Amino acid sequence: MTTTEDGPDWDPIRALARQVLRQGAPLVLTDDVRGLLRRTAREVALDAVDVSTDASALAVLRECSRRITEGSNRLGDALHRMYRHQQKGDYDSARQEMRDVLSVEVVPLYREIAQGQLAVMANTP
């Protein structure tokens, strides 16, 4: 698994999704692409993936891309709202933002970030 200091390196899957899903390039199923899809599927909590056919691999690529993008947007928006609540001294609402993320988020990295924010706020009023 390729990771950065902050977590998985999703640049390769993002580049593949951009080429295939947005630009219409064909999905070429090499061993490297299959490995990338399997690894990324694990990183976004997508279990028992089938990348043996073009159709199944394309479905895995779509779902991985969706989970990364939607989870990132959801977490980013919630963090922004959380910080605004904190600036106003409203820590109950700030904590609720992270609990709301945790109620729907499946990507382990994003869950870990939300849980970390809750832990930081654990000792605040």
Image (cartoon, grey):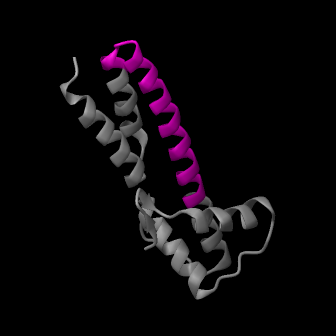
x, y percentage for residue 114?
A: 36, 40
Q: Residue at x 44, y 67 (%)?
A: 3
Q: Is residue 52 visible?
A: no
x, y percentage for residue 1?
A: 43, 74
Q: Closer to the camera, 4 or 58?
A: 4
Q: How many marks?
A: 0
The answer to if 72 sits in the magenta stretch is: yes
Q: Residue at x 55, y 60 (%)?
A: 64
Q: Residue at x 41, y 47 (%)?
A: 110
x, y percentage for residue 61?
A: 61, 65
Q: What are the residue bounds of the magenta stretch?
A: 64-93
Quarter holding the C terminus is: top left
Q: For residue 85, what is the image quadrant?
A: top left
The answer to if 97 sits in the magenta stretch is: no
Q: Is residue 24 left or right of residue 67?
A: right
Q: Residue at x 32, y 26 (%)?
A: 95
Q: Residue furthest bottom?
A: 31
Q: Is residue 18 visible?
A: yes
Q: Is residue 34 left or right of residue 112?
A: right
Q: In the rendered view, tell whether residue 113 sits above or below residue 84.
A: below
Q: Closer to the camera, 88 or 93?
A: 88
Q: Main secondary structure of the magenta part?
A: helix
Q: Residue furthest right?
A: 24
Q: Closer to the camera, 19 or 54?
A: 19
